[in-house]
């Protein structure tokens, strides 16, 4: 009997049930990106961005959320200075996937990053412009706003205020939607 309990314990998952990995499909498009082709912080290694994205699988509470949030913001820019580099633009679609497929703490982390990029961060002074999807140079701020606006449908589908994460998820979702509504028109069109 004692051995049966021990075996059952050993076969149990080692992580709490709320700590689910994101589906591998979420990472597929990110794995195809040549991250070195985008301007990014000089302290990054060639794998810094992907490692920060894969860290989303470790987010399961407020403390792990804060850790991944900071690591991602430093992989994409300078969190302390409140700036981002062009490498941040393709990551926004990934954050939209996190909002769709992630657990509540992964979603809170993604929403926190998107709000910072919407309201308080700006392009690094070296990179006011960057190539857009059409290959032409555009304002990096316009590219960021357009990428964030494209995440809106995922944010709108989040459930109304819940008790998970202390209600932060729905508060952050409302804040992000209000920020998107306040974006000025871009020179890129819709």
Image: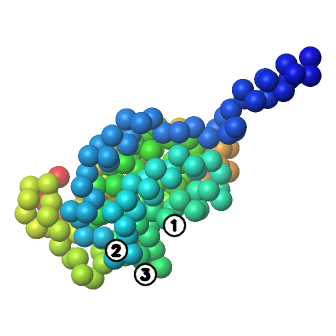
Tag in front: 1 or 2: 2
- For residue 59, which numbered disc appears in the image? none
> Which residue lies under the disc numbered 1?
70
Q: Which image quarter: residue 125?
A: bottom left
Q: Would you place residue 124 above or below residue 157 in this image?
A: below
Q: Is residue 167 above or below residue 142?
A: above
Residue 5 coordinates in the image, percent (x, y): 86, 23
Q: CA distance from mark 3 to mark 2?
A: 12 Å
Q: Pick whichever of labels 1 and 2 is earlier in the sequence.
A: 2
Task: Please report the residue visible at 50 percent of the width from the left and 50 percent of the height from the top.
Answer: 56
* Residue at the (44%, 67%) spot, across then down: 73
Residue density around tag 1, few if under 14, some if 14–19, many if 20 or more, within 10 Å = some
**Alpha carbons under labels 1 and 2: distance apart:** 14 Å
x 78%, y 23%: residue:
8
Task: Give the quadrant of the N terminus.
Answer: top right
Horizontal side, residue 129 vs residue 160: left or right: left
Depth check, mark 3 against mark 1: the one in front is: 1
Considering only vertical position in the picture, is 37 above or below 122? above
User: According to the image, label 2 marks what residue?
Assistant: 41
């Amino acid at each position: 009997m004692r051995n049966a309990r021990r075996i059952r314990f050993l076969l149990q998952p080692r992580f709490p049930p709320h700590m689910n990995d994101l589906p591998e499909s979420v990472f597929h498009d990110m794995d195809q990106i040549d991250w070195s082709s985008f301007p990014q912080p000089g302290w990054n290694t060639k794998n810094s961005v992907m490692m920060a994205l894969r860290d989303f699988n470790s987010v399961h509470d407020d403390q792990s959320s804060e850790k991944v949030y900071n690591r991602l913001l430093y992989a994409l820019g300078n969190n302390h200075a409140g700036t981002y580099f062009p490498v941040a633009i393709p990551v926004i679609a990934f954050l939209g996937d996190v909002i769709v497929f992630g657990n509540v703490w992964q979603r809170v982390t993604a929403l926190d990053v998107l709000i910072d990029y919407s309201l308080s961060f700006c392009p690094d002074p070296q990179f006011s412009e960057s190539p857009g999807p059409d290959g032409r140079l555009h304002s990096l701020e316009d590219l960021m706003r357009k990428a964030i606006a494209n995440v809106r449908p995922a944010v709108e589908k989040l459930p109304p205020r819940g008790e998970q994460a202390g209600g932060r998820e729905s508060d952050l979702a409302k804040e992000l939607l209000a920020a998107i509504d306040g974006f000025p028109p871009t020179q890129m069109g819709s």
